[in-house]
Image (cartoon, helix red, strand yellow):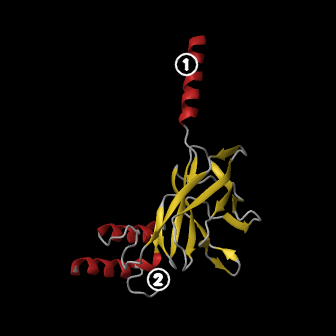
């Protein structure tokens, strides 16, 4: 009996050691004057339902505002009554807080949780670093978790390339996939809106997919 208890205890410790809870961004490129949608990704082994984090942006990058509100979008991993609010703090960090009145956990175990509408100033030069710090998550039982600070590198894209939706400096079938994924599920990691708006109607739609395919066929 004692041996069984020891084995169970060892297994429990091993499982807890391999548990993954991470809130992070991935490296990306952006052109001066460009606006993109940038994903913050959550990997979680816990039933998280609320969080707060501090977003530190370098000079030349900012979150787009609308009537004084910073523009963030929660993905389908969140419940319908999930709320997100933000405020710029004295230290320059943008504090982001999100909670759910019905206390429903985020769905899935990995994927984009928040989409940031980010813009680069005309004089943005890069390279730069974006940081996420002071990330606190709570579970449906009220248990609190402190996640590690994270950062990502930002490179300045030399020029905007029409059709380069993923910002890798090339236009190919990967960009078609990027636009389709955006239409089906929203932002994956970073999405270059101006580049993807092939017909320049300021709306990303299936028409841009068609136009992008036509671009590839005509090359």
Q: Nearer the viewer, residue 78 or 137?
A: 137
| Mark 1 residue crowding within 10 angstroms, few (<14) / some (14–19) / many (20+) | few
Residue 189 visible in the current orientation: no
Considering only vertical position in the picture, is 104 above or below 167?
A: above
Q: Locate residue 98, reporting x and y percent.
A: 68, 60
Is disc 2 placed on a helix, strand or loop?
loop
- At a point 62% along the width and 56% down the height, the residue shown is 132
Q: Locate residue 69, reporting x and y percent.
A: 69, 75
Residue 153 visible in the current orientation: yes
Could you say which disc has been placed on residue 7 in the image? 1
- At a point 49% along the width and 58% down the height, the residue shown is 26
Q: Quadrant of residue 161?
A: bottom left
Q: Quadrant of residue 169?
A: bottom left
- At a point 71% along the width and 43% down the height, the residue shown is 143
Q: Quadrant of residue 199?
A: bottom left
Is disc 1 placed on a helix, strand or loop?
helix
Residue lying furthest right? 90
Q: Quadrant of the C terminus?
A: bottom left
Q: In the visual, does 30 lie left or right of 180?
A: right
Q: Nearer the viewer, residue 180 or 33?
A: 33
Q: Label 2: which residue?
A: 203
Considering only vertical position in the picture, is 72 above or below 218?
A: above
């Amino acid at each position: 009996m004692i041996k069984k208890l020891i084995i169970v205890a060892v297994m429990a410790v091993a499982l807890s050691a391999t548990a993954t809870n991470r809130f992070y961004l991935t490296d990306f490129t952006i052109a001066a004057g460009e606006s993109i949608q940038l994903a913050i990704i959550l990997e979680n082994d816990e039933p998280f339902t609320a969080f707060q984090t501090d977003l530190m942006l370098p000079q030349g990058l900012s979150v787009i505002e609308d009537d004084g509100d910073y523009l963030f979008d929660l993905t389908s991993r969140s419940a319908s009554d999930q709320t997100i609010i933000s405020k710029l703090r004295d230290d320059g960090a943008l504090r982001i807080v999100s909670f759910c009145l019905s206390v429903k956990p985020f769905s899935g175990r990995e994927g984009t949780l928040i989409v940031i509408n980010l813009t680069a100033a005309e004089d943005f030069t890069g390279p730069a670093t974006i940081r996420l710090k002071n990330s606190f998550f709570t579970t449906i039982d009220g248990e609190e978790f402190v996640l590690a600070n994270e950062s990502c590198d930002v490179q300045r894209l030399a020029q905007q390339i029409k059709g380069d939706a993923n910002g890798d400096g090339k236009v190919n079938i990967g960009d078609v996939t990027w636009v389709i994924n955006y239409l089906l599920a929203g932002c994956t990691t970073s999405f270059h809106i101006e580049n993807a708006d092939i017909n320049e109607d300021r709306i990303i739609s299936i028409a841009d997919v068609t136009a992008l395919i036509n671009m590839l066929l005509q090359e």
